Amino acid sequence: MSSLAGLVVLATFAASPARADVKIGFQAPLTGPAATDGKSAQIAAGMAVEDINAAGGVLGQKVQLVTYDDQAKSDQAIFTANKLIGEDGVKLVVNGSYSASGRAAAPVFQKAGVVMIAAYGVHPDITRAGDYMFRLVHLGPPQGAATALYIGKTLGLKKISTITMDNDYGQATMDGFIEAAPKYGVEVVNKYSYSLKDRQFGSIVASVKRDNPDGVYATGYFFTGGPLVAQLRAAGITVPIIGSQAFDSEKFIEIAGPAAEGTYIIDSFDRDRKDEALQKFFTEFKQRAGYAPEGVAAITYSAVRLMADGIKRANSAEPDKVRDALAATKDFPLLEGNMNGFNSLHEMIMPIQVNEIKGGKFTPAGSITDLNAFAPPEK
């Protein structure tokens, strides 16, 4: 090769810069009271990115996760959303945080034309923010409606005392239950509420005992549900306790101890499902985290994988094209099972699984398959 030809080759190579990574923004509560869930979500998101990149990435590029701690606070969610947009140039985001954070960040991303998948935030306002928003968990009110169906038709319970966490997640989910309960012959005897910071529930427990209900339905997170269930059982309340989706954690069993036995958890997932990807995820997550994965971890992993799949189907990382590809999703294998796509408001359509704690383990207790009974709202 002549020296001139060599210069031409070098010049051509220099003029072709390496392709940049595809950035996916990630928000999670890595500090504060929700840090346990946030850490699980972060581990799962990292695993998803590693698996995607090991399989060749997307569009010939590696996926890079750009992570920020939102502390499960609205102001931090807005602040980190603006950093992702302004400083990092992110156009695609997975929100691995609670409802208040997702609800606050959604309008920021929508205004900037950034696609966001809310992994487990259930407040209706998240997808109402606009057409760049998607949700990969059942909306709060439909979860509540499905719970009413399960309590009334499957468990055959008639009189229920309800205990609600007084945040976006707890209230939205309980609203759906209260509205749907009469359809299934379920009477709400009394309604009680508590705050995210509460761990002592003496007055609520005493009131529930006086109610003498057929069952108790409680919304909350595993770190509030654990002590609540333990205190209900310690007071001699033996009726079935039905917990909401965020009870879904091995740590719930650890905190509640033997009192967890018999608790039903709605919108949980079948950990023993014969699925190679699920079992591989379980094994690898436990090796990294030192504990078994919970619902938020599985959902977050699936959300990152779905975003990558949307990029591939769009053959582009441009948000408009990814949004349209995600909206057209018909059947996608989540770790929790196959989803049936999104509706017009970009709410996930999928049966709801139920677990019961038996022998200190999550045990499948049926599936709520009447999709019309808990259909999410449309545009």
Image (tube, rainbow, N blue to C red):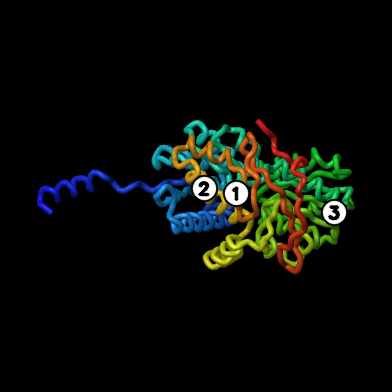
Give the Cα distance between marks 2 and 3: 39 Å
Question: Considering the image in quadrants, where does the N terminus appear?
Answer: bottom left
Q: How crowded is mark 1: few (under 14 residues within 10 Å), some or many (20 or more)?
A: some
Residue 226 appears in the rendering = yes
User: Given the image, on which type of amino acid does mark 2 rest?
Assistant: Asp
Q: Position of residue 269 (x, y in %)?
A: 68, 56
Residue under label 3, please give it. Answer: 155
Tag 3 secondary structure: loop
Q: In this view, does 356 lie to the left or right of 297?
A: right
Q: Residue 309 carries which label?
A: 2
Q: Where is residue 250 in the image (x, y as percent from the top left)?
A: 66, 62
- CB atoms at circles 2 and 1 under 8 Å apart? yes
User: Given the image, on which type of amino acid does mark 3 rest?
Assistant: Leu
Q: Residue 332 carries which label?
A: 1
* Closest to the observer, 350 or 69: 350
Mark 3 or 1, nearer chain start: 3
Residue drawn 49% across and 48% down? 308
Q: Where is residue 109 in the image (x, y as percent from the top left)?
A: 50, 36
Residue 210 appears in the rendering = no
* Closest to the observer, 10 or 180: 10
Mark 2 or 3, nearer chain start: 3
Question: Considering the image in quadrants, where does the C terminus appear?
Answer: top right
Q: In this view, does 369 lie to the left or right of 117?
A: right
Q: Which mark is residue 297?
A: none
| Foreground label between 3 and 1 | 1
